[in-house]
Amino acid sequence: MKIKVELFGVCRELSDKDHIDLELNENSKIKDVRDLMIEIVKTKFPENNNYLEMVKKSAFSSKDEIVEDAYKLQNNDAVSIIPPIGGG
């Protein structure tokens, strides 16, 4: 299934666009999005532990509500990754 991850704050440095399109398995959850975003950071910024920690500590929202890692996604959902204020 396709998921659009909207990027805010310093997370915008993870892409040349204001979002990242992900392809996930059916029945995926926010945790799967977080794990995939961590892999993107490890590939794109292998030396930058700050970005890695940012993704690990970021909140995710869907439909204007903060959601937990167990939140189940639907095909074509748009979620936002919101980095911690002040970096931690």
Image (cartoon, rainbow, N blue to C red):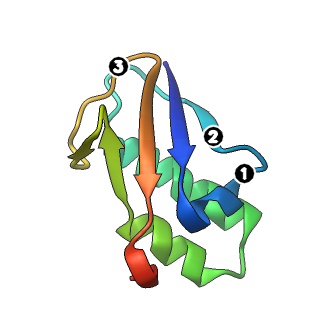
Task: Provide residue 78's location: percent of width, then percent of height.
Answer: 45, 29
Q: In this view, does 16 lie to the left or right of 23?
A: right
Q: Mark 1 points at which residue?
A: 15
In this view, 73 is above or below 32: above
- Displayed quadrant of residue 12: bottom right
Crowding at dot 3, Cα within 10 Å, few <14 / some 14-19 / many 20+, comes out as some
> How dense is the environment of label 1, judged by Cα within 10 Å: few (below 14), some, or many (20 and up)?
few
Q: Nearer the viewer, mark 1 or mark 3?
A: 1
Element marked by disc 3: loop
Establish if 41 lies above or below 35: below
Q: What residue type is labelled 1?
A: Ser
Circles 1 and 2: CB atoms closer than 8 Å: yes
Percent x, y for residue 23?
57, 27
Q: How crowded is mark 2: few (under 14 residues within 10 Å), some or many (20 or more)?
A: some
Circle 2 residue: 20
Q: Which mark is residue 74?
A: 3
Judged from the image, the secondary structure of the residue bearing numbered disc 2 is strand
Type of amino acid under label 3: Gln
First-in-chain label (1 vs 3): 1
As measured in the structure, the alpha-carbon distance from the residue carrying label 3 to the one carrying label 2 is 16 Å
Quarter of the image with the C terminus is bottom left
Q: Is residue 35 left or right of residue 11?
A: left
CA gap between label 1 and label 2 equals: 7 Å
| Disc 1, SS | loop
Give percent across and percent down for residue 31: 34, 48
In the shown orientation, is residue 34 left or right of residue 2?
left
| 82, above or below 75, in the image | below
